[in-house]
């Protein structure tokens, strides 16, 4: 082994006092980082906590509503949900896409707007898409008081229910006491 041309480095020969000072400094850094963390209750608020803080109820739960669907005893599925203040009253509504539980095929959807009444139980206040229209709804969203969805349908009764062949992008906005439907950028496309 060849001797080094560099001078002896004092820090390479650590003593117990050096390690104690290093451990104390690290503990101080960890403690300071812990004190500077944001309050977990304030930083990771659920909609329920935010609503409670602002004095409003949380958005209605679509699983707590009885829907006007004839599912022949098979039950129904909440396939989609989106929440937001749709009528400008400061309380959130929920829009739910619901269809009968089916083993196969594409069952028609109902798109419903839910709100909380004077009591705590949510209720349906509007039907945006009736299942009798034989449409399926997807890509549901609520932004700035506007509900948007993609509706899939059929060009004729000869099209099998598994395979909708038409697509329409639609929005609904609360105006004059009712939800007004408009077609999106591509009104009707063939799938």
Image (spheres, helix red, strand yellow):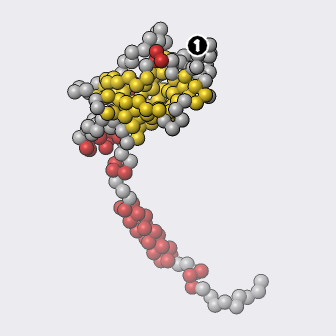
Q: Position of residue 26 (x, y in %)?
A: 46, 68
Q: Which quarter of the rendered picture does the C terminus lie within?
A: top right
- At 44% across and 11% down in the image, what residue appears? 70
Please give the residue where the numbered disc 1 appears in the rendered image.
157
For this rendering, which residue is in front, 17 or 51? 51
Q: Does 121 appear above or below 92?
A: above
| Residue found at the very far right of the displayed protein | 1
Quadrant position of the N terminus in the picture: bottom right
Residue 95: quadrant of the picture: top left
The residue that appears at 39% across and 15% down in the rendered structure is 68
Q: Position of residue 177 (x, y in %)?
A: 28, 29
178 lies left or right of 151 = left
Residue 85 appears left or right of 130: left
Q: Which x, y percent locates residue 38?
A: 36, 56
Outermost top residue = 72
Relative depth, front residue between 11 and 166: 166
Question: Is 119 rendered above or below residue 11?
Answer: above
All told, the count of numbered labels is 1
Q: Indicate the position of residue 62 as horizontal and vertical percent values.
A: 39, 26
Q: Is residue 133 visible?
A: yes
Q: Is residue 169 left or right of residue 4?
A: left
| Residue shown at 48% from the left, 35% from the top | 184
Q: Dot 1, how many residues are within 10 Å of its Cα: few (below 14), some (14-19), or many (20+)? A: few
Give above or below for 56 relative to 38. above
Disc 1 secondary structure class: loop
Q: Residue at x 41, y 63 (%)?
A: 33
Examine the rendering and report whether any part of residue 58 can be seen.
no
- Nearest the viewer among 76 and 97 is 97
């Amino acid at each position: 082994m060849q001797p080094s041309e560099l001078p002896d480095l004092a820090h390479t020969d650590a003593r117990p006092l050096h390690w104690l000072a290093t451990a104390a400094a690290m503990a101080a850094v960890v403690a300071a980082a812990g004190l500077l963390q944001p309050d977990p209750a304030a930083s990771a608020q659920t909609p329920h906590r935010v609503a409670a803080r602002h004095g409003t109820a949380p958005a209605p739960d679509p699983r707590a509503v009885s829907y006007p669907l004839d599912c022949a005893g098979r039950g129904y599925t909440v396939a989609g949900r989106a929440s937001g203040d749709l009528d400008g009253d400061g309380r959130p509504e929920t829009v739910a896409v619901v269809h009968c539980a089916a083993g196969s095929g594409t069952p028609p959807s109902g798109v419903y707007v839910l709100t909380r009444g004077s009591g705590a139980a949510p209720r349906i206040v509007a039907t945006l898409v009736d299942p009798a229209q034989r449409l399926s709804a997807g890509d549901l969203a609520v932004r700035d008081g506007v509900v948007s969805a993609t509706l899939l349908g059929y060009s004729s009764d000869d099209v099998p229910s598994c395979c909708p062949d038409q697509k329409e992008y639609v929005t609904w906005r609360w105006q004059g006491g009712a939800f007004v439907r408009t077609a999106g950028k591509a009104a009707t496309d063939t799938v």
